[in-house]
Image: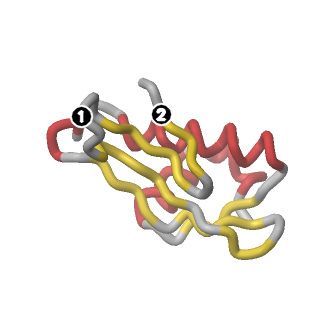
Amino acid sequence: MDFKHNENQIALYSEEGTLLAEITFPNLDDNTVDVNHTFVDTSLRGQGIAGKLMEELVGVLEKKGLKAVPTCSYAQGWFEKHKEYSHLVK
């Protein structure tokens, strides 16, 4: 997967530039982001793309020393299932 890292967004685009998947995480303060949206196009659902987006996000959080407040239902459930990353949740 060739995810594009933008400010407060990790996204996957088709060769034509169409958004296929994304996770958004706007800043709440200097140390905290709100994981507020996860999207995967219907053509890619069931392939673990949302989980891969979360793994990319974890890398960003760890690299930048940030904490997450997951308000997106997918992100909430993902962090619940992956307790090894609970240190990243505020």
Snapshot colouring: secondary structure
Q: CA distance from mark 1 to mark 2?
A: 15 Å
Local secondary structure at mark 2: loop
Amino acid type assigned to the residue bearing label 2 in the image:
Phe
Farthest residue in the top direction?
1
Is residue 36 toward the left or the right of residue 17 in the image? Answer: right
Name the residue: 42% across, 66% down.
Answer: 73
Q: Quadrant of residue 27?
A: bottom right
Front label number (1 vs 2): 1
| Residue 67 in the image: above or below residue 22 | below
Q: Nearer the viewer, residue 70 or 4?
A: 4
The answer to whether any part of residue 80 appears in the image is no
Residue corresponding to mark 2: 3
Q: In the rendered structure, find residue 16 and report the number of the disc placed on it.
A: 1
* Residue that sits furthest to the front in the current view: 16
Residue located 56% across and 37% down the image: 55
**Badge 1 density bin: few <14, some 14–19, many ≥20, Cα 10 Å:** few
Residue 28 visible in the displayed image: yes
Q: Position of residue 50 (x, y in %)?
A: 39, 43
Looking at the rendered image, the quarter that the N terminus falls into is top left
Q: Look at the image and tell me in which quarter the C terminus lies.
A: bottom right
Say which label, 1 or 2, has the lower sequence index: 2
- For the residue labelled by badge 1, is the local secondary structure a helix, a strand or a loop? loop
How many numbered dots are placed on residues in this image?
2
Q: Residue at x 50, y 37 (%)?
A: 4
Position of residue 80 measured from the top left corner of the image (x, y, whole percent): 55, 55
**Could you say which quadrant of the image residue 13 lies in?**
top left
Q: Is residue 62 left or right of residue 15?
A: right
Q: Residue furthest bottom?
A: 28
